Image (cartoon, rainbow, N blue to C red):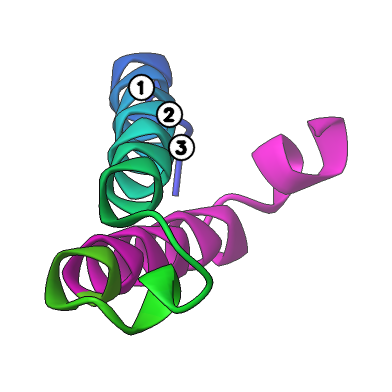
Amino acid sequence: MPVDAEEWRCLCETEHDLQLAYARALRQAGGRMAEREPAVQAAEQRWSEHQETMRRYLRGNPELAAAL
């Protein structure tokens, strides 16, 4: 599968956005048990799902994976 540079750029931007959303949810929840808050768990789930999308993309693009 050829590397689609625009698609990879969008995946990376989404990854960054999801990291920020997760950090923001943690900060807003505050306290020691923040990771148990529903908003934090939802942000973590979205980020985790996106990471799996990126892993699948890299598995389908070994030349990109090798370059990283």
Residue type indicated by callout 1 = Glu
- The residue carrying mark 2 is 16
Element at badge 3?
loop
Report the predominant secondary structure element of the magenta stretch. helix
Nearer to me, 9 or 66: 9
According to the picture, the residue beneath numbered tag 1 turns out to be 13
Q: Bounds of the magenta span? A: 42-68
Q: Quadrant of the C terminus?
A: top right
Disc 2 versus disc 1: nearer the observer: 2
- Residue 49: quadrant of the picture: bottom left
The answer to which quarter of the image holds residue 24 is top left
Q: Residues within 10 Å of mark 3 (few under 14, many from 20)?
A: few
Q: Residues within 10 Å of mark 2 (few under 14, many from 20)?
A: few
Which of the labelled discs sits on residue 36, or is there none? none
Q: Residue furthest front?
A: 31
Residue position marked by numbered label 3 in the rendering: 2
Q: Does the stretch in magenta take in 61? A: yes
Callout 3 amino acid: Pro
Amino acid type of the residue tagged 2 in the rendering: His
Q: Secondary structure at mark 1?
A: helix
Disc count in the image?
3
**Image coords of residue 59 (percent x, y):** 59, 65
Confirm or deny contact between disc 2 and disc 1 (CB under 8 A): yes
Please tell me which of labels 1 and 3 falls first in the chain.
3
C-alpha distance separating marks 3 and 2 = 23 Å
Q: Is residue 22 above or below residue 68?
A: below
Residue 2 left/right relative to 40 = right
Reading the chain from its start, which is encountered first: label 3 or label 2? 3
The span from disc 2 to disc 1 (Cα, nearest Å) is 5 Å
Q: Is residue 58 magenta?
A: yes
Under circle 2, the secondary element is: helix
- Could you tell me how far apart the alpha carbons at marks 1 and 3 are, in whole angstroms? 20 Å
